[in-house]
Amino acid sequence: MRLRGVSKRYGPRGQPVLVDVDLDLAPGEITAITGGNGSGKSTLLRVLVGASRPSSGTVTGRPRQIGYVPERFPSDERLTARSYLAHMGRLRGLSTRDASGRARDLMEQLALAGGMDTALRRLSKGNLQKVALAQALLVPPRLLVLDEPWSGLDVSAHGALADIMAEVASDGAVVVFTDHRGSVVRTHASHIYGIAEGRISAMADAPQLITRLVLRGPDGDRVTMSIASVDADGVLLDALRRGWSVVKVDEPVSARGAG
Amino acid sequence: MTALFRYTAAILFHSQRYVAPVLVFLLGAGAFVHGDAHQPAIPVFGAMAGVEFAFAIWLTVSLVNVEDPVQRTITAVNTGRSRCILVAATLVVLACCLVLDALVLAVPVVFGFTGLTGLDLVAGGEALLTGACAGIAIGLLTSRLVIRRIGFALLAILVLFVFFLVVPWLPPVHPVIFLLAGHASATGGLIASTSAYTAIAVVMLVASVLVTQLVAARRD
């Protein structure tokens, strides 16, 4: 997938949100876009999925099967998670049975099986994020675009999301995500771009050494997590406070190989 | 399109935003359609076309506005065709209108209105369809996709509703109501006229879908 000279402004007199963006995205790679609030990350993702037309420039090679996880998932839907995912699956061409089965599998993988019959408006932010992830994965995407996907997820879902992204990329899909936290970006991405005031720049890939930890929870659950610094964004500290313990520490490896 | 129709109908059903316009429609039907078998059916159908016009505007605005913009983006990505979302909303409202139209047309048949003919039902059906299509067209143009601010949208709805209902030379709603009000039974000429107004309403609806889609796409 290739973007050339993509610019975007809202309205003829609006400030440019994206300025002359060139970007190449290859299958099998996990690309991170990092930048501050209002830097243009979300707009760039909307252009990637085709939800927003660029004011100028071209986007080529966009696949048909796209999974999109927005930064803010709508929280006032009255449909249950099960019904919502079945509808989204049918929109993607699945039969009702296949859509329901796939939704059930995904929600089990993301540990929301118990909330399937809860109305979306009653789900917590983290569980809504899981539903958002599930709807993007109902049909294996060729382009998976995630806007701040770790926002609100609990520690076990963190690991599941990282595994899913790596799995989707290893199937030959393009995976793009945004996050404003450098440690998260370095841990999970193979290519990193920075964006500021709508201008994108390739950052040093910074193959920072990261460490994998295996944690055990109070009820015996085991979770593998990767950290790029003393504490990746408070997730580790949060887990330790809630009674998890570290049971294994692997040798540090390159972030590129860690997935 | 079937999946999108089902999803859109489910959103409408779960949101319960159909309740108020349906109640208003039923109140209007109660005022104009009653069991007096001696009243001519044609003027009643004309009056109900006006009620249908109001109902269609209200339901369209409610349905289009109920879906969160972010969810609309997700739906568009999942379907792969953003313009289908608007078409599905239009079809859902039209389906609701057709169900209520069938009820309105059934009342004179059930109560055995004097002198009711098949042509009367055709003229009535066309008048109701005219009100529905014109109402959906106005509803789309005053929805959040075109007018973001709710105050301006409400003002636009009121102005357009009164304008189309009151101005005699402005087709299709006012002329079709008063055309039917002046007839006790349908003739070939009346059917031709109502057909013309229905065609105008359908053109209005198609143009409204295209304009709304264009404006929404530009906003994105």
Image (tube, coloured by chain):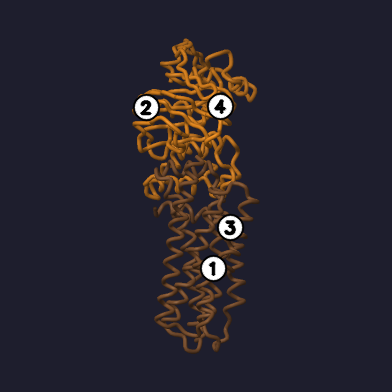
Chain colours: A orange, B brown
Percent across and percent down for residue A205 are: 45, 14
* Dot 2 amino acid type: Arg
Q: Which residue is mark 3?
A: B16
State yes or no: discs 2 and 4 in contact (Cβ < 8 Å): no
At 45% from the left and 24% from the top, the residue drawn is: A20
In the picture, residue B59 is in which quadrant?
A: bottom right
Q: Which residue is mark 1?
A: B52
Q: Mark 2 vs mark 3: same chain?
A: no
Q: Which residue is mark 4?
A: A155
Give the CA separation, mark 1 to mark 4: 54 Å
Residue A180 visible in the snapshot: yes
Which element carries disc 3, helix, strand or loop? loop
At 34% from the left and 29% from the top, the residue drawn is: A171
* Dot 4 amino acid type: Val
User: In the rendered image, which quarter contains the C terminus of chain A?
Assistant: top left
* Dot 3 amino acid type: Gln
Chain letter of disc 1 in the image: B
